[in-house]
Amino acid sequence: DVWRGAIALPRFLKDSDVDAVRGKRVLELASGTGILGLSLALEEAREVLLTDKESMCNLLSKNIEQNGAIIARYGCNVQAAPLDWFCAELDPTVAAFRFDIIVLSDVFYEEEIVEPLVRTLRTLTLRAASPEHTESSGRDFQSRIEHAPPIYLCAS
């Protein structure tokens, strides 16, 4: 199923800031079918990494393959990789991906995922703000968070 937020967020980004995605490297969390990230590929994102739990990665890869000709016309590189919010270790593809923005939609449907999601977002944003360090505190933390990539979230 495709949830409404995955349709609404690309429209919002296009209408509110035409350059929010253009030329950017996009990391999508909880991609589901991948419709959000695939839509952003058509908005001229440079790269999109679709992530979800391991059991969803075959579907994501299939949807990337089925839409490959369209994606290729826009010059976007789209990949899929597992990302388990309950696991501290990042998949090597996710760990190596240098992203400019994070997008996610319709992820708050079970209370027990909120804390792991927040931990995952913190890990990812701090790594992106300062890739050579993974943990920090105090002023260094504040400086790094100020340079962290934006997170766009849509909940429907």
Image: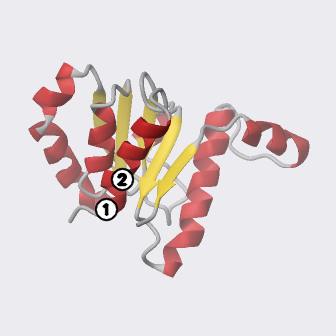
In percent of width and height, residue 6 lies at 33, 54
Q: CA distance from mark 1 to mark 2?
A: 6 Å
Query: Does 23 appear above or below 91?
Result: above
The answer to whether the residue labelled 1 contacts the one labelled 2, judged by CB atoms less than 8 Å apart, is yes
* 22 to 48, vertically: above or below: above
Residue at image coords 85%, 39%:
140
Which image quarter is the C terminus in?
bottom left
Mark 1 — residue? 4
Residue 92 location, x and y as percent? 44, 40
Residue for badge 2: 8
From the top left corner, tell me how far across and down residue 118 is, in percent. Answer: 60, 62
* Furthest-front residue in this view: 15
Q: Secondary structure at mark 2?
A: helix
Left or right position of 131 against 61 = right
In this view of the protein, which residue sits in the foreground, 36 or 29?
36
Q: Give amino acid for label 1.
A: Arg
In the rendered structure, the answer to whether residue 27 lies left or right of residue 60 reads right
Quadrant showing the N terminus: bottom left
